[in-house]
Image: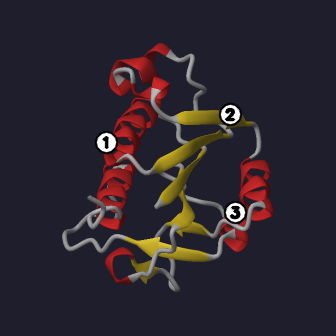
Amino acid sequence: MKIHIVLDNIRSAFNVGSIFRSCDGVGSVEKIYLCGMTTDTDNPKLHKTALGAIDMIDSQYYDKTVKALEELKDQNIPIYAVELTDNAKHFQKFDYPKEFALIFGHEKQGISKKILDICDNVIYIPMRGMKKSLNVANAASIILYEVTRNIE
């Protein structure tokens, strides 16, 4: 399995660092696309939570998320947004191909409609409590470990 991670305007460098660690932990992430306001790998806050994982995962910065998505589309890699929308599919009931991209959005604003329209599908994590969303780094970890759980 090959997974590409797109971080669309993630405002917290600590969240980005934590996502790098989870990506290294699952062992199936090919590349992290750092887009928009998402910090590049030279940020000391990212280093604090990544604990060296930035050296384990290929990454690249894009000023516009659309450019990263175009690159993925050119490689025929399906893109799945992680977002709460009316048409989103339960992340545990979704069939993932051997290679795909997951896009995670801004901690408060989520993923814009413009970006969602480019995606091939939308998945969500069900929320059973009062809050309607998880921290983006926690959400990334949950989904990454679920989609790779059958990999030895």
Q: CA distance from mark 3 to mark 2?
A: 17 Å
Q: Answer above or below: position of 101 versus 127.
A: above
Q: Residues within 10 Å of mark 3 (few under 14, many from 20)?
A: some
Tell me the amino acid under the disc marked 3: Ile
The kind of secondary structure element at disc 1 is helix
Picture coordinates of residue 136, whole percent (x, y): 40, 50
Q: Nearer the viewer, mark 3 or mark 1?
A: 1
Question: Measuring 76% from the left and 44% from the top, which residue is drawn there?
Answer: 64
The quarter holding residue 58 reads: top right
The kind of secondary structure element at disc 2 is strand
Which residue in the protein does label 1 denote?
25
Q: Answer above or below: position of 8 versus 127.
A: above
Tell me: 40 left or right of 26.
Answer: right
Q: CA distance from mark 1 to mark 2?
A: 21 Å
Tell me the amino acid under the disc marked 1: Gly
Which residue in the protein does label 2 denote?
61
Picture coordinates of residue 26, whole percent (x, y): 33, 48
- Which quarter of the figure is the C terminus placed in? bottom left
Tell me: 22 left or right of 58.
Answer: left
Q: Answer above or below: position of 14 versus 88.
A: above
The quarter holding residue 69 reads: bottom right
Which residue in the protein does label 3 denote?
115
